[in-house]
Amino acid sequence: MAVARFYDPTGARYGMPTYPWRLAPEGLATRRQLRAKGLRPGGQPVAGQVMWRSRRYQSGVRVAYLYRLERALPVREMTPGRWAALAKALAARRICPGCGLDRGYTIPTSLGTCVPCADPMSLAA
């Protein structure tokens, strides 16, 4: 059974306290759970991990690291400079390298250009 396989609160088997999916003790949270509460790890070491089986990954096991809630710090506020840098970065992702136009959507990395530039038949029409 997977629950018993991943239950190692002492860390003897995996080197750090390990818990199965949804069975982590109170006071520990993943990065996403911290972010949902407006917190960040703040440089603290990993306090444990959650492991679960997954068919999507070749290893068959996924891991999420846990951090202590009492040692977490509030998320840093976005400064005007950070907002400007983010806006520039997102705008750069919308500009097609082929035609140089701002397409209003993120250029697909699979194509490398906007959809009209990638499809020569649409240009002929």
Image (tube, rainbow, N blue to C red):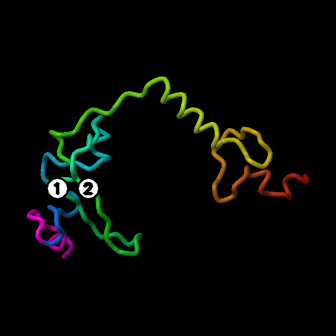
Residue mark closest to the camera, 1 vs 2: 2
Q: Residue furthest left?
A: 10
Q: Which residues are magenta?
A: 1-12
Report if the CB atoms under discs 1 and 2 are less than 8 Å apart. Answer: no
Location of residue 106 by image quarter: top right
Q: How many marks?
A: 2
Dot 1 amino acid type = Ala
Q: Please report whichever mark, 1 or 2, sits nearer to the chain's N-terminal start.
A: 1
The percent coordinates of residue 85 (x first, y second) are 54, 32
Q: Position of residue 55 (x, y in %)?
A: 38, 72
Which residue corresponds to mark 2? 65
- The residue carrying pointer 2 sits among few (fewer than 14), some (14 to 19) or many (20 or more) residues within 10 Å by Cα, namely some
| In-image side of 48 versus 63 (left or right) | left
Q: In the structure shown, which secondary structural element does the residue marked by tag 2 occupy?
A: strand
Residue at 22%, 39% in the rendered image: 72
Q: Where 7 sits versus 82, above or below?
A: below
Q: CA distance from mark 1 to mark 2?
A: 11 Å
In the rendered image, residue 106 lying in the magenta stretch gets the answer no
Secondary structure, mark 1, is loop
Circle 1 residue: 24
The amino acid type found where label 2 is placed reads Tyr
Q: Position of residue 50 (x, y in %)?
A: 23, 60
Is 37 rendered above or below residue 32? above
Residue 5 appears in which quarter of the rendering? bottom left
Q: In the depicted view, which residue is nearer to us: 113 or 76? A: 76
